[in-house]
Image (spheres, rainbow, N blue to C red):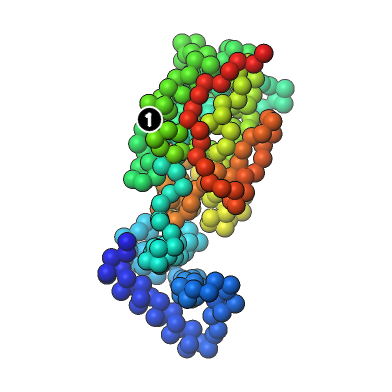
Amino acid sequence: KLTCDGQRDFAALQHSRINDQETNGKTSAASSNDFSDPIYKEIAITNGYINRMTREELRSKLAEFKLETRGVKDVLKKRLKNYYKKQKLMQKEHISGDSCYDYICVVDFEATCEEGNPPEFVHEIIEFPIVLVNTRTLEIEDTFQQYVKPEINPKLSDFCISLTGITQDIVDKADIFPQVLQNVIDWMRQRELGTKYSYSMLTDGSWDMSKFLNIQCRISRIKYPSFAKKWINIRKSYGNFYKVPRNQTKLTIMLENLGMSYDGRPHSGLDDSKNIARIAIRMLQDGCDLRVNERIHGGQLMTVSSSVPLEGAPAPQMPRYRN
């Protein structure tokens, strides 16, 4: 809940917006709003004032509320608007302020590759990382990482080794994919995901699940795992939440716009996953309800509407082998 000081600050913030509108003789855009509750008019008036604040004014106000002050101006505006909106609605008990899921499992596979990415080349997963984000504490609670031995192209290209940092010796000593997947499922079960705790998978783009995992399951002659049939594509979530075009949703650009820099080795699956998790945590802090927005059905990528009833991923189970 907002503290007494915070309530006074926002009351003052709101009062200054109303005065500002009266001074300029402007009519609130909220007058045409379908929401009958006056709280939405208050929010609309405040949003209009926030839109006119300078970057320094935004940073100063965010600092008052002990919120993150890093990021480009549009991110700062969204952060302040969402904080105010959530606090006002929680006072009215319109929302609980809780995340959609108890946990988010961030996955970013590394796969075999060749320079130039020839179309006939078959990509095989060679690193399976998971970063477990606790949506209540907004912290990375645990990580999983195992390397995978490729079967179709067991010898890694020099390009792949240079890009990923994964050596031939590492994959030679690794388990094949079905065993690694079983280890992943055991790890998730130990953390009671899908039983005691609700969760969702999260990726940076569509390819991890719709392409890499899909292809790998066919190579390994196993059915596609049910726990990975739906996921949060953070690029879509980020673009929709901060209202930015698709070319502003690459990993390094998302980090930069949020006032952060990449930490670790690019194209390390685990390091990529940790950085994606940092973006997810910042988005949750900024008031974004991260929820499933993509799924795979019949081997095809499909969009999940935000109007679909919310449900977490099922308890993980090892898929059956294909006939």
Q: Is the residue 238 above or below the residue 229 in the image?
A: below
Q: For the residue labelled by badge 1, is the local secondary structure a helix, a strand or a loop?
A: loop
Say which quarter of the image contains residue 159: top right
Coordinates of residue 26 in the picture (x, y in percent): 54, 85
User: Which residue is found at the position 48% from the left and 30% from the top?
Assistant: 315
Coordinates of residue 252 in the picture (x, y in percent): 50, 44
Q: Is the residue 141 above or below the residue 81 in the image?
A: above
Q: Is the residue 235 above or below the residue 13 in the image?
A: above
Question: In screen coordinates, is 117 left or right of 196?
Answer: right
- Would you say residue 263 is visible in this rendering? no
Question: In screen coordinates, is 11 left or right of 164?
Answer: left
Q: Nearer the viewer, residue 289 or 313?
A: 313
Query: Outermost residue toward the left?
Result: 4
**Image quadrant for the N terminus?**
bottom left
Query: Outermost residue toward the right?
Result: 120
User: Which residue is found at the position 40% from the left and 63% from the top?
Assistant: 93
| Amino acid type, callout 1 | Arg
Count of numbered circles on the image: 1
Badge 1 is on which residue? Answer: 191
Coordinates of residue 54 in the picture (x, y in percent): 45, 70
